[in-house]
Image (cartoon, rainbow, N blue to C red):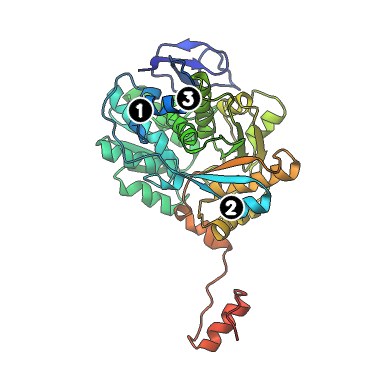
Amino acid sequence: MYYTGKVKCLHCGREYDTEHLFEGCPHCRTKEFVSNVTPLYDLPKTDGKRETFLQMFPGKGLSAYQALLPFRKKRKLVDLGVGNTALTALERLGKELDLELYIKDETRNPTWGHKDRLNAVLINKALEQGAPGVIYASTGNNGASGAAFAAKAGLPCIIMTVTGVNRTLETFMQIYGAALIGVKTTTDRWNVLKHMVDEKGWYPATNYVIPIVGSNPWAIEGYKIIAYELYRQMKVLPDKIVVPICYGDALFGIMKGFSELKEMGFIQKIPQMVSVEDYGPVAKAYHEQQNIIEPVKGWGSVASSMSTVWGTYHSLYALKKSHGLAVSLENNREINAAQKELAQKEGVYCESASASTLAGLKKLLAQGAIKKGEKVVLLITASGVKDTAVTASYLPPVPESTAEMDDIVRILKDVYHLPVGS
């Protein structure tokens, strides 16, 4: 096993021999700043051959990479079939944008999103720790994913949500049997989490402190597998990987996976990580070369699963480590247009946050930050069926017909501009 049982602060480098450090590094924490910690591994040096990697990590599921995950002992993992998601070429859009363009399609995971990678590790880590249960602050994707894995493991699950955010996702969280409780504010949720973690020993999945530290650092390791899968799936890795971020857990996890591949000798450099935000707190701090991420003003984004005025240090760390790019959006029209374009040109119906990757890509192309001919992977984090209300809000009503052929032809021509002959 490669996991050492230790963690290291991303900012000050201090190491800790503990597995209960959920509020960030206490050494460099201030009222304005906090850095998450990350698990440490004693990784082997290799000959760098792809065949060696395949021999070291046979198979394509979660268990294949168990040695690269933060478990103290090898054992049978609770799993719903997470990972091994499709890498799909976007040929029409790629041609239009003059890019070699792909998506890593995380909608193929058990609960139709990339959060399954985090929760596959989190639930197994909670079992290893002997925790009485797991607890989340979530308005949807993460809570539903965690509830599913907790159900599979027979582990109690509490989800603190904000009342009235998304009824579809509320249903999604409830059906798995989690104890779902709605409160009025985000701060209310965090107060409950802190009490349950500190006083009752429940295992936290999500952030519950200010400044924002991000998710459980051991669980974030699940996102590293995206990097390992891309290494398997691509003979030549992409120049850039575009990730929609809220607290940047996936952005950091993917970067760390590539960093470990580099440390073991399988790759020579880490692909550039590209963060896309709606409001842009991380982009602002990155462009201003600041470590402290100040909250920014929101504008009412429809991309609820990524919307936050806050940011995390590990997002900045991932961008710095990979010499990456950061971009923020300006309005919902960009997001809606990208969602529609992905669906109608490539057959990919993703949620609004996922679609923001295409919107961000276009902005960076226009700025010259991404060059024509580059190889780019967009991370599609979740399915559009999780929030059809947003999509329905900008689609036109379905035209009604008498079912007479003349009327059908008229509608096809006038409404859909579809030629059907004379």
Of badges 2 and 3, the one in the foreground is: 3
Q: Which residue is pictured at 29% across the width and 20% down the height?
A: 73
Q: Which residue is pictured at 30% across the width and 46% down the height?
A: 176
Mark 1: few/some/many CA within 10 Å (<14, 14-19, 20+)? many
* Residue designated by label 3: 49
Query: Contact (CB < 8 A) between labels 3 and 1?
Result: no
- Please state the horizontal and vertical placement of residue 9, each as a whole percent of the image: 52, 16
**Is residue 2 toward the left or the right of residue 281 in the image?**
left
Q: Can residue 6 be seen in this view?
A: yes
Task: Tell me the number on the disc at residue 203.
Answer: 1
Depth order, front residue of 272/171: 272
Depth order, front residue of 81/309: 81
- Please state the horizontal and vertical placement of residue 264, each as a whole percent of the image: 48, 19
Q: Is residue 225 above or below residue 111?
A: above
- Please state the horizontal and vertical placement of residue 14, each as a whole percent of the image: 52, 11
Cα separation between marks 1 and 2: 43 Å
- Please state the horizontal and vertical placement of residue 160, each as a whole percent of the image: 40, 39
Cα separation between marks 2 and 3: 30 Å
Cα separation between marks 3 and 1: 39 Å
Query: Which amino acid, by three-letter code, is at mark 2?
Result: Glu
Q: In this view, does 343 lie above or below 251?
A: below
Q: Label 1, secondary structure: give it.
A: strand
**Is residue 292 toward the left or the right of residue 116 in the image?**
right
Closer to the N terminus: mark 3 or mark 1? 3
Query: Contact (CB < 8 A) between labels 1 and 2?
Result: no
* Residue designated by label 2: 91
Task: Tell me the number on the disc at residue 322.
Answer: none
Query: Which amino acid, by three-letter code, is at mark 1?
Result: Tyr
Q: Which residue is pictured at 51% across the width and 37% down the height?
A: 234
How many marks on residues?
A: 3
Mark 2: few/some/many CA within 10 Å (<14, 14-19, 20+)? some
Mark 3: few/some/many CA within 10 Å (<14, 14-19, 20+)? few
